[in-house]
Amino acid sequence: MNPFCSINQTAIWAQLHQHQRSTRFLHMRDLFEQDPDRFDKMHEKLNGLLLDYSKNRITEDTLTLLIELANVADLGGWIEKMRCGEKINISENRPVLHTALRLEANAEVYVDGHNVVPDIHAELEKAFSFAESVRNGDYKGVTGETITDIVNIGIGGSHLGPEMVTLALRPFHQSGLNIHYVSNVDGANLMQVLKTINPARTVFIIASKSFTTPETLLNAQGARQWFLQQGFTQQDIARHFIAISSATDKAQQFGIDGKNIFAMFDWVGGRYSVWSTIGLSVMCAIGKKNFQDFLAGGRAMDEHFYHAPLRHNIPVLISLIGLWYHTFYQTTSHAIIPYDHGLRRLAAHLQQLDMESNGKQVGRYGEHLDFDTGPVIWGEEGVNCQHAFFQLLHQGPRLISADFIVPINSFYHVSTQHKVLVANAFAQTEALMHGKTLAEAYAELMHLDNRQRDILAPQKVFPGNQPSNTLLLDEINPFNLGMLLAMYEHKVFVQGIIWGINSFDQWGVEYGKVLAKNIQPELSGQEPLSHDASTNGLIAYFRKHHHDSNSN
Ligand code: F6P
């Protein structure tokens, strides 16, 4: 495909629109009835992961056309470019190498003629040895006591991935070591954590790729000020504050000792960085061996992504099916529903991963994209969400796709509860797909008189035909979690490539940061305001009613 020809100008694009028009009234209930082998034909397995994508509004023809679309977009070529370190983040002139973070030490990937794999492993080893020394008690605070609390101060990619993985792998934690996350510039976040910790036994990790993010720096300053107020000295900071950043000079200017800075690389986007030294808080929680298993899981998914034929390629399938809805059905959202308490922050992590990557309407060469792209990603842990938003999925007017993520085994000895949990997950996907017809609803209400039945039966109809993928993991262990996360990273990549988006910059977020910087001094000032009437009104109201209370 000519790089300047938008994908929506291609013949395959038109064919997919035509295919959507001719298949949109198919009901999945009928597709399952017509083909008892539909599950066998529409699921894939990789190690401890199974993807069932049979409950989607697709036929074999749909998949053939979508795969043709991926080929027209030169997906294979772009995968190779990413893998080899080509500068595919065009607007920032950088390669995109989170996959390199998961490579084994003897692999090679070159950036500007330099093999970066030894650099990655050198930094990882440094982080592992720090984490191990905290875990085994060798690393002591200035009073000679061991460390009981790690506070990770970061936001966005320097927070969401590490927090999500830490929570998901709770059964692998070392007991006696508490990991806290502070991200929000709302002082309540930091204050609530500080109340629970002993400064003599705490290490603060300031995690910021750029080391310019105001929220993180403000929280870091707040933590440092609090630490000094507890009777510690400036010299003591070196023992209790460490940093992770690609801007090591800025971290040093902030006052972090050079030997306490773990490097990360500018060719890893924040939202893809949990595999790097940004995962230090995770390493402290689960240790080197488990973190290496997490990397190995990611690597296994990478290998599958690079080599499996597209028709059997898990990230490609899940991506193409998502794109089928977002672009050709023009759906606007996709739900992430893990039936696992540990995965309760998965939707938040994937929100950043997907929406910060593909929430764009301009293509990588600056062209306007005249079609629907990045979906709204949202979700909540099951079964809690069944008692919250599932009503709308079952009987609301919108087509909403969803991923159900379900571990087959739990680490807790709660087999009965676990079966109830899993039964709920399976029941939801069945109900969403199958629905309930008016005739079925009437049949259930035979005990009522006709008038009552006429009123109630339509309300008990479930349209069904609501699509879902089910991802079964044999358990949520580091390896399987690594596979799952890498799968979602590649899903986002594939959609971005087909839509023609650069998934690796985030100019929208940068713009918001600039505006906040302008408004901040105005909140305390008296000078006239020159925003729109609403923003002026809000600032003026804040000035009038805010009580200054700077007491960290
Ligand atoms: O939210 C915007 C963003 O730039 C993210 O891409 C990034 O993960 C986050 O801010 C934090 O950035 P940093 O790690 O540089 O502090």
Image: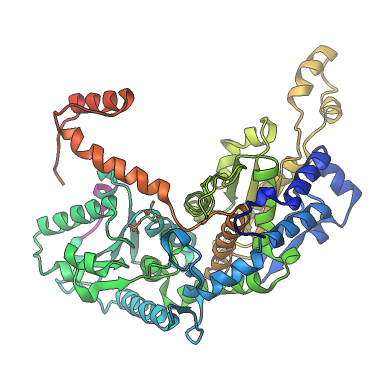
> How far across and how far down the image is residue 390, in percent?
62, 37
Locate residue 209: give its quadrant.
bottom left
At a point 68% along the width and 48% down the height, the residue shown is: 9
Q: Position of residue 346 (x, y in %)?
A: 51, 53
Quadrant holding the N terminus? bottom right
Q: Within the magenta stretch, is there residue 362?
A: no
Q: Regarding ligand 1, which quadrant of the image does it lie in?
A: bottom left
Q: Is residue 299 above or below residue 428?
A: below
Observer-nearest of 34 and 410: 34
Q: Residue furthest top?
A: 451
- In the picture, measured across the screen, residue 198 lies left or right of residue 20, that is left
Residue at 49% in and 55% down: 353
Magenta stretch holds residue 194: yes
Q: Does 466 appear above or below 143?
A: above
In the figure, is residue 387 to the left or right of 308?
A: left
- Considering every residue shown, the one lying at the far bottom of the view is 106
* Magenta residue span: 191-198
Residue 27 visible somewhere in the drawing: no
Residue drawn at point x = 35 percent, y = 61 percent? 179
Give the side of residue 243 with respect to residue 379, left or right. Answer: left
Query: How many marks are shown on the rendered structure?
Result: 0
Question: Can residue 438 be seen in the rendering of this structure?
Answer: yes
Quadrant in which residue 529 is drawn = top left
The relative height of residue 541 versus residue 481 in the rendered view (above or below) is above
